[in-house]
Amino acid sequence: MRRRIAILILSLVASTALLAQQSDVVVDYSKPQTYVIGGVRVTGNQFLDQSRILSIVGFKPGSSITLPSEDVAHKLAALMNQKYFRNVGFYIDSLSVAKDTVWLRVDVKERPRVSAWIYRGVKKSEQDDLKEKLNLKRGGELSEYVISSSTGVIKNYYKEKGFNNAKVNVITQEDSLVNNAVRVTFDVDRGKKVRVRTINYEGVEGIDKYKLDKSMKKTKDRSWYNFFNSKKFNEDEYPNDKNSLIETFNELGYRDAKIVKDSIYTIEEGRLGIDFKIDQGRKYYFRNITWTGNSVYTAETLNQVLKIAKGDVYDIVTLNQRLQGGKEGEQSVASLYRDYGYLFFNVTPVETTIVGDSVDVEIRLVEGKQATFNNVLISGNNITNERVIRRAVYTRPGFLYSQTDFERSIRELGTMTNFDAEKIVEQGTGWNLIPDPINNTVDISYNVEEKSNSQLELSGGWGARTFVGTIGINFSNFSTRNFFRKEAWRPVPLGDNQTLAFRYQTNGRYYRALSASFVEPWLFGKKPTSLSISAYYTRQTNSYMGMYGYGYGYGYGYGYGGNYPFYDDSKSMDVAGVNIGLGSRLKWPDNYFTMYHSLGWQMYKLKDWYKYYVFTDGTYNNLHYTFSLSRQSIDQQIYPRIGSDLTFSVQLTPPYSLIRGKNLDYKSMSDQDHYRWLEYNKWTFSGRNYVRIWKDLVLMTAAHFGYLGYYNRNWGYSPFEGFLVGGDGMSGYNTYGNEVISLRGYEDYSLTPYINNAYAGNVYDKFTVELRYPVILKPQSTIFALAFLEGGNCWSDIKDFNPFQIKRSAGVGLRVFLSVVGMLGVDWGYGFDGPAGERSQFHFTIGQQF
């Protein structure tokens, strides 16, 4: 380093001496002398301001300077290191008469500026990606560093895409229109994509090639089971895959396995072969497992968690997973301790004895002291009140640390639709743990990101041969507490996670529906007891825009030869109802369970009405109590990856027929007297399970069952509250009095028995297998594609029920969730058991999730 500085000083001295002689300034450079700087000027600068250059070198009038000196050399070197200049000259313009004051000049030659960055041999989409990665600006200076670093970024970009042999030629041309400017062209030759054709293993016995290939996540060959995997060769991931390969041998008991040699060779242009030479070694087994340092749990308890017995294959990978954790949903020794406050717990397995093919392992524990939560910090909630978040999390200051409570808190925040569920699970951005081993405490911070989840629905849908318009608004973070605070209306008071919704549907005189609902998830503030209130009213009439005035079999229109409006409200059905419910979270069997009770009343008023029911006139009442038990453990609401959602419910009316007596002749009664007060018992079950298969690829399986029963066979099945099975789950409008069940690939209600000119669906089942993969996962929008298999059926009597007699379908679909609208869905389904010519069905909905 000193030698380099000395050379620089000598060069500066020689240069200055020459220029001094040219300026008729005589300076004796063999003897360093200190001068006072009388002035400094900069020449040659076009883009950079003089004051900025002088601030870098630090030459100020009035200050002293020694020439020559290392200090001057360092300052000029610092100026060159700014990468703005191709050359820097240092000059003495003049000396005072007394030769104690010096006037200096710094002459710079700036690097050329880039007037245009051009990409050749690059696709438009790739060009956009490269511009984002390189972040090169017009007007920036050009240097060797910029060229080399940009070339490296471009090569790495194509290497990630499998173009390992990509070449980049950088061409610079002077810009004839701009002074001291150049046009830079990155001429890219991607070459052929490099893919792995074959992978071979030498020295392996008793292990299938499929198992070894599967262990490598990024390095795949053309075997049939890798059909859906990329075959491109990823040089950066290759070392990790080699480690994974050895781990697979370790899992099978080959603790000494190693890769003796691996060869990567070219079969033809763009195609590689990989040969591994493996020293497999002998297979080992566990013999004696002992525990030391454990005082909280006995060795017997720890062995139950470890699940490894004498004689088991010596699987190092599984041993570490069951000690340290890492396998989703599986308990480990570490989680056992950390759920009891032992955050600073440590465990180390040590091989103590190896005899033949048997290994003795001593597992050494350092339990440490129990840790407690100290500060629980919450940030990012600029709309939601902090107390709403604090009541949702399970981590409280002063409580013992619990890994399960911490993970449950993350899940609860993820299922709250107010926040970005993807961000909250990420360490560093969504949460942070700050342990303090000295004081045995831990601080935790939750950094939530608010997202808009109130929804405005302005939609149109086609169903039941009519167009229906909908307007609705749903405030999912409403606050009644702030209702009377003027400043809280932005545009409505928000922040308490309450739900307030209004919805209106109509297609003119034929159909109108109005509904309102309110949900308070924490009624008393301290316990998760929810209150829900809803009210609704619908009216359907015989008015219809029908072909030739035809209106579902009744009446004829006003003319012939086209579509004519058929306005007639002499036939109608009015439905009104209210419902109030209370729900509470349970502690047993676990705190994922919730119990819900509700009481509701519905009134049906029919006036010469011909649809759905076996009678046409009368007023009918439905007073019912509903009990439901549900367990929800999904990780988030919009795109769940793990967990399940199970619900069992029973809906009961008073047994009026038992109160009236057993000897009544219901057949001789009028419909009005018979069904004035409805009686039934309705049993339903719905279950969904989500399993992450690979990354964000999710398998959803679901099963549904419903049965509408009776207390008295003579009274019979209720004409209301049955099931309408088939189609997209929407009729285009709400139909109270029946539960609409989707089954894609079939027309609406087409699987529902139709008896005596009325639907009679009293029993149904439905099974779904759905494979989902996300396209976009963002706070304001989520898009995922799906493929499904579905089957189900509907029966009029429980005696005919056969769970294996199902109508099958398959298809594909797309879901788009927008925070301001809700879920949009489009599906194509093929009903294998539908009528010929009607087996292909498209289903499109707005604001409805299948």
Image (spheres, rainbow, N blue to C red):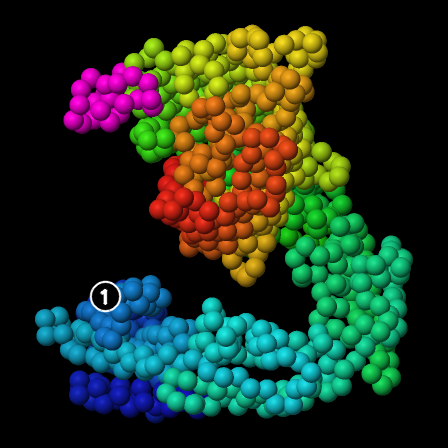
| Foreground pick, 727 / 156 | 727
Q: Amino acid at mark 1?
A: Arg
Identify residue for label 1. 138
In percent of the image, x 51 and y 39: which residue is there? 417
- Measuring from the top left, give residue 373's x and y in whole percent: 71, 45
Is 784 placed above or below 45 here? above
The reply, left or right, for residue 560 in relation to residue 790 is: left
Residue 548 on the magenta span: yes
- Measuring from the top left, give residue 324's x and y in whole percent: 73, 63
The reply, left or right, for residue 104 in relation to residue 677 is: left
Q: Is residue 535 visible?
A: yes
* Main secondary structure found in the magenta portion: loop
- Measuring from the top left, give residue 344's x and y in whole percent: 75, 58
Q: Residues within 10 Å of mark 1 (few under 14, many from 20)?
A: few
The reply, left or right, for residue 640 in relation to residue 284 is: left
Quadrant of the rendered image containing residue 400: top right
Q: What segment is highlighted magenta in the picture? A: 545-567
